[in-house]
Image (cartoon, rainbow, N blue to C red):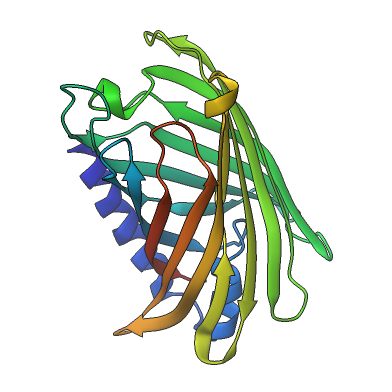
C-alpha cells in the first residue's frame, strides 16, 4: 500500500538524520514540538475520538498520521511541509447508513518561514486537499486549495500562536463545492522535566453549509510530556475538547491522544 510505503520511508530517512544530530534537552524539544515552523523532522500519530455524533450518540475515530519535514532553502529561509493522512472510522447518521472505515482526504501544507524572525515567528504558504478518500462518506471527491498562515511567539516558558487556512474546491467529480476555513490557536506552558500544559482546539467553518451548520467551536486542553523510548525522543500528549458550537449531527466532545516521534538535528 502506497501510504504504508511512504510512512516506512519517512521513518528510515528520519532515523538516519537523527543519528547525526545533537541531543537536545526536554525543554528545547517541548518548545520545538509546539512550534509548527520548527526546523525539526517529526512523525506525529494523532488519534481523535469524537463522541455524541448523531441521534444515536455514536462515536467516530480519526487517526491522523502527520509527517513534518523541513527544508533549508538558503541562508535566510526555511520551507516546512506537513502532510496529514487520515484513517477514519465514521458512523452512519441517516436511516440505513452503516459505519464506514478507510482513508480520508489527504492534506498537504507547506510554509516559507524566515530563519531569523525575532520575537514573532511566522510562516506563509498554502494547503492542498487531495481526493484520496476510499469512500464517498469519508471525503469530498474534490481537489481543494488555498492559503495557510502561521504566527507564534515563545516568551519564557510559553508558546502561543495561531494557524489559519481556507481551501476552495477547483476540480474533481464531487457534487458539492468546498469552501472550508480552519483556525487552530495553541497555548502551551512548559514545566520541568519535559512536562507541559496545552490547549490547541481546531475551530472550523464550512461556508457552504447553512447558518446552523457552519461552525465547529471546541474548547479544552490537556497535558503532555517529552520522554524517550530507548534513545528515541517522543512527545506524548492527551487532551479533551468540548464542542460548544457544533453542526447538526456533529460530535459533542473529542478526546485527543498523540504520540510524536522526534528527530532533532
When asked about the image quadrant of residue 200, the answer is bottom right
Residue 235 position (above or below residue 121): below
**Taking 237 as reference, is 161 left or right?**
right
> Depth check: 92 or 193 in front?
92
Residue 53 position (above or below residue 147): below
In the image, farthest residue toward the front: 55
The N terminus - image quarter: top left
> Depth check: 175 or 163 in front?
175
Residue 149 position (above or below residue 22): above
Residue 83 position (above or below residue 9): above
Q: How many marks?
A: 0
> Residue at the spot x=45%, y=36% of the render?
107
The location of residue 199, given as percent across then percent down, is: 58, 64
Residue 196 in view of the camera: yes
> Residue at the spot x=48%, y=37% of the render?
108
The location of residue 264, given as percent across then percent down, is: 50, 71
The location of residue 21, given as percent across then percent down, is: 48, 75
> Residue at the spot x=36%, y=18% of the render?
141
In the image, farthest residue toward the right: 118
> Residue at the spot x=56%, y=70% of the render?
198
The location of residue 208, given as percent across then percent down, is: 55, 18
> Depth check: 57 or 10 in front?
57
> Depth check: 210 or 12 in front?
210
Residue 44 in view of the camera: no
Amino acid at each position: 500500500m502506497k501510504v504504508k510505503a511512504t510512512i516506512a520511508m519517512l521513518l528510515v530517512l528520519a532515523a538516519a538524520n537523527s543519528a547525526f544530530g545533537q541531543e537536545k534537552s526536554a525543554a528545547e524539544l517541548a518548545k520545538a514540538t509546539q512550534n509548527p515552523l520548527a526546523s525539526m523532522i517529526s512523525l506525529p500519530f494523532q488519534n481523535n475520538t469524537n463522541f455524541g455524533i448523531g441521534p444515536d450518540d455514536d462515536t467516530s475515530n480519526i487517526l491522523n498520521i502527520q509527517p513534518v519535514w523541513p527544508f533549508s532553502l538558503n541562508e535566510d529561509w526555511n520551507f516546512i511541509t506537513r502532510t496529514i493522512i487520515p484513517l477514519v472510522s465514521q458512523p452512519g447518521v441517516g436511516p440505513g447508513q452503516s459505519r464506514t472505515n478507510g482513508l480520508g482526504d489527504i492534506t498537504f501544507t507547506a510554509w516559507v518561514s524566515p530563519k531569523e524572525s525575532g520575537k514573532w515567528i511566522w510562516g506563509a504558504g498554502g494547503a492542498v486537499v487531495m481526493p484520496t478518500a476510499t469512500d464517498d462518506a469519508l471525503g469530498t471527491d474534490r481537489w481543494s486549495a488555498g492559503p495557510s498562515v502561521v504566527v507564534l511567539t515563545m516568551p519564557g516558558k510559553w508558546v502561543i500562536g495561531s494557524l489559519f487556512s481556507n481551501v476552495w474546491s477547483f476540480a474533481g467529480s464531487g457534487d458539492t463545492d468546498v469552501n472550508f476555513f480552519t483556525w487552530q490557536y495553541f497555548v502551551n506552558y512548559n514545566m520541568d522535566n519535559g512536562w507541559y500544559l496545552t490547549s490547541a482546539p481546531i475551530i472550523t467553518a464550512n461556508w457552504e453549509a447553512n447558518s446552523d451548520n457552519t461552525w465547529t467551536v471546541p474548547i479544552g486542553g490537556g497535558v503532555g510530556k517529552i520522554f524517550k523510548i530507548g534513545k528515541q525522543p517522543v512527545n506524548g500528549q492527551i487532551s479533551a475538547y468540548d464542542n460548544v458550537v457544533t453542526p447538526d449531527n456533529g460530535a459533542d466532545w473529542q478526546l485527543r491522544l498523540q504520540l510524536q516521534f522526534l528527530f532533532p538535528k
